[in-house]
Image (cartoon, grey):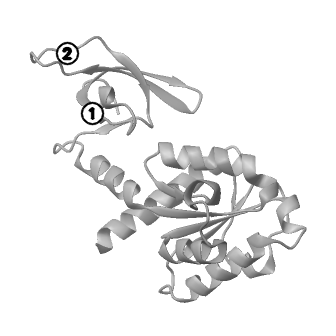
Amino acid sequence: MKPGVRVFCDDRDTLYYDFTGVIASAVKHGNRWIFGVAFDSLDGSLNAPSELDDMQIWPTEDEENKEEAKQRRADEELRIFLCHGSEDKEAVRQLHAKLKASGMRPWLDEVNIEPGTEWDESIRNAVKESHILLAILSKRSTAKAGYVQKEIRFALDRAEEMPEGRVYIIPVLLEECEIPSRLSRWQAVRLYDLEGETKLFSALRKRAAQIAGEA
């Protein structure tokens, strides 16, 4: 996105930012873009620019930006199950926040399971309803038996129902570690690599676009 492009902002929490406007400036900070967005005012003029990052705005659906806006809508429908061990909870929380900020719909046990709900049933239903499962792995989680192994079994059952070639499971490595044999047939993404996060989000967006095309 560049200066002059019309965008929409909806942070889903603060109605103040539910407006359309125009990008007035764009500056890259590391791997992120910071945009100065001049929002429309009631009298038809533009307000002074507000600083927002690339996870808070997306193009309005005019002809020039139709494909990017379409991808944004597809991302919002993508349901992602985060399969992980308790040892990696903090790293998974950070990934959950990034996925949610990007507009996707990640499922995390501590966020999505209501108090008093039966654990097994909640996990099984979430796996079944997800479009894609991220099997988040580390030396700690792969070295011991635990609930993550049960989640993987649920996921493998679900993967068997998918058409051949359909991306459903992505092993996500938080560090260099051995991939369980049951997951080794799927290409892993190494989140600790420089381009790891970019590759992961690219794969997720391709899956989201595929789902939107099937709708």
x and y percentages locating residue 150 in the rendered image: 73, 78
Amino acid type for the residue under numbered disc 1 = Val
Q: Secondary structure at mark 1?
A: strand
Q: Quarter of the image holding residue 85?
A: bottom right
Residue receiving disc 1: 7
In this orientation, which residue lies closer to the viewer: 94 or 35?
Answer: 94
Instruction: Tell which of 6 and 82 is nearer to you.
Output: 82
**Pointer 2 or 1: first along the chain:** 1
| Figure check: 125 above or below 74 | below
Residue at the image point whose x is 40% and y is 55% from the top: 75
Quadrant where the C terminus sits is bottom left
Q: With 144 as the anchor, is 203 left or right in this view?
A: left
Q: Which residue is mark 2?
A: 46
Q: Is residue 115 left or right of residue 184?
A: left
Q: Residue furthest top?
A: 48
| Classed neighbour count for the residue bearing mark 1: other residues with Cα under 10 Å, few (<14), some (14–19), many (≥20) | many
> Which residue is at a point 41% across and 62% down the rendered structure image?
208
Locate residue 176, reporting x and y percent.
83, 57
Closer to the camera in the image, 40 or 196: 40
Please say if 54 is above or below 47: below
Count of numbered circles in the view: 2
